[in-house]
Image (cartoon, rainbow, N blue to C red):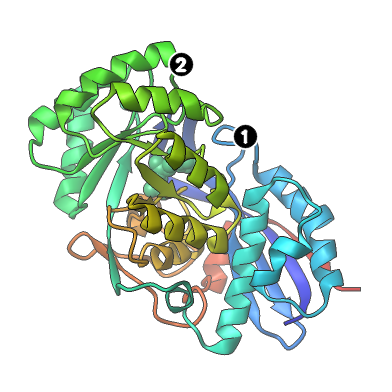
Amino acid sequence: MRVASIELRMLGLPLVRPFRTSFGTETEKVCVLVRVETAVGAVGWGEGVTGPDPGFSEEWNEGLWLVVRDFLAPPVFAAGDLAAEDLDRVLGGVRGHPMAKAALEMAILDADLRARGIPLHQYLGGVRSEVDCGVSVGIHDDVADLLQTVERHLVEGYRRIKLKIEPGHDVGPARAVRERFADILFQVDANAAYTVEKAQRLAELDELDLLLVEQPLPEEDLLGHAELARALRTPICLDESIVSARVAEQAIALGACSIVNVKAGRVGGYLEARRIHDLCVERGVPVWCGGMLETGIGRAANVALASLPGFTLPGDTSASARYYAEDITAPFVLEDGRLSVPTEPGIGVAPIPEHLERFTTRVEKLLLD
Ligand code: NPG
């Protein structure tokens, strides 16, 4: 296919409640949507997982916009006929910026698969029609409030609870959740908030029978994670550290993690995400699908990814209502703790035009000369 136009859109959607992590509190979802149109009129949608600031990783919305506009769009236009599988080569001159590359890849893959009538889950090799869903609970100052939030999500049917932690809000709140809800699948996520010294305290989590502790140390510290993994009984899962299949291979070989969180945005796209999945299956390492508060566009693709066989743990693929009173697509609805995998071609969903306009704050359209 030949890409004829790439449209960038900045969106701002109110979140139903603030989401607090060790790197900040979000009250609004602000992200970039990418729409591509091919020379024969096929349309595809992609979503950037960046936020308004470089808190989770180095990338952020304005940077993603500029990188797509100034560095990724020109080689894509110049490439002529191309498929998503060619993007590694076509974009090879741009170092880093996986989230920008992933947003563009998703749009190109969506357009291509729609034109060919193939749903994303089928293209990726999915094996399930619905996926088990967990929910991520932000940091709460008050333990009674936290327990109420967890209870609400359990009543909604979520099959696993993940609690955000940071130094000062870790073992205490996690213990309170475990004491109150003895049998639930439960894990914690530190978003790289610990130093090696401070992380020693995380050994106290061992008695809480957690599924995993996610990304305690900074992303580049694979050896630190390996050392910590030897000191803890709770399995270590890596998120921010795993930026490619090659790094996943190294992290596993070093013993830095025994579980991997797969986020397509973080690793440059769905094709690399599938390579990480395949590697982990080969190594016997369970994977699960992470989330970045995606709108229905990114959520659709995540749910397709989570249908692959190695995704044996519930993901952060929550229902749209967990985040949005109104989404830009039809909402994803939880049924018995699961979301259905879209069955239509491509990512299987598209924005509702009226919603899209309402939540758009800026548009820029790039055209093939
Ligand atoms: O359900 O989409 C979700 C949120 C899951 O906790 C979640 N995401 O560190 O994984 C994370 C965190 C996150 C949210 C990261 C927003 C970056 C931005």
Residue that label 2 marks: 195
How far apart are the alpha carbons under marks 1 and 2?
A: 20 Å
Quadrant housing the C terminus: bottom right
Residue 294 place in picture, x, y as percent? 47, 54
The quadrant holding residue 146 is: top left
- The image position of residue 106, as x and y in percent, is 59, 66
Amino acid type indicated by mark 2: Thr
Residue at 40 percent across and 37 percent down: it is 19
**Would you call the spot at circle 2 few (<14 residues within 10 Å), some (14-19), or many (20 or more)?**
some
Q: Is residue 30 left or right of residue 9?
A: left
Q: Pick the residue in front: 366 or 228.
A: 228
Ligand 1: does it lie within 8 Å of the C-beta at label 2?
no
> Which residue appears at 34% of the width and 49% of the height?
285
Quarter holding the N terminus?
bottom right
Looking at the image, residue 24 lies above or below residue 318: above
Name the amino acid, label 1.
Answer: Pro
**Quadrant holding ligand 1?**
top left
**Residue farthest right in this picture:** 369
Camera-side mark, 1 or 2: 2
The local secondary structure at tag 1 comes to loop
